[in-house]
Image: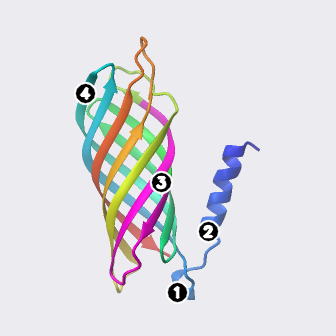
Amino acid sequence: MKLKYTGILTAITILFSGASASANMLMDVYAGATIGVGGATMFANDNDVSHSAQSYGAVLGLDIPVFRFELEYDYLHADSIEMHIGMINAYAKMPLPAVKPYIGVGIGNIFSGQDTDFIDLDSAAAYQAMLGVTFDIPVLPIDVDVEGRVLYAPDIYEYSGIAPDFLQYEARLKLRYVF
């Protein structure tokens, strides 16, 4: 089995090995959805092109008192490009009762996509940073995250000697159901 698939299976096993929140464990497993709006910029040979961008995604994660880890899928659509992104994220948070500020980082891969000129995107590494706040809804097993995110992917395709970098920044809303 390839090392990449072994790592993915290990991460999923760790996420689902936690008990539910009602079992008085220190960890919670959650699943959720994201939606975001912002802008995207392509950097290539001193020709920067910026457009508005939207993203939609799904997350699966493990929440412990000070840290949170999650697997994330995003579909990103800008005026000139669309792509599918898979990320592994880690967050550090302040363990306050109802409102929890956090900071996070992620690493992943752009695994599919197209430019408006129908240029297929190469599989490229992607990096992101997040800053936000989590609101716990006291009587429901739902958490609401409001965050700002910056995503960077170098050399997303190569065409006629041009290999542009991609930068996306957005405000994002994430709804998480805690099991």
Q: Earlier in the sequence, mark 4 or mark 3?
A: 4
Q: Residue at x 25, y 27 (%)?
A: 49
- Measured as percent of width and height from the top left, residue 71 is found at 52, 56
Residue range highlighted in magenta: 89-113
Q: Give the mark toward the camera: 4 or 1.
A: 4
Residue type pointed to by label 2: Phe
Disc 2 to disc 3, C-alpha distance: 15 Å
- Dot placed on the residue nearer the N-terminal end, 4 or 1: 1
User: Residue 92 in magenta?
Assistant: yes
| Amino acid under disc 1 | Ser
Q: Which residue is mark 4?
A: 49
User: Dot 3 lies on which element?
Assistant: strand
User: Label 1 belongs to which residue?
Assistant: 22
Residue where numbered disc 3 is placed: 72
Q: Secondary structure at mark 2?
A: helix
Q: CA distance from mark 2 to mark 4?
A: 42 Å
SS category of the residue bearing label 1: helix
Q: CA distance from mark 4 to mark 1?
A: 49 Å
Q: Which mark is residue 16?
A: 2
List x then y, in percent, for residue 10: 68, 58
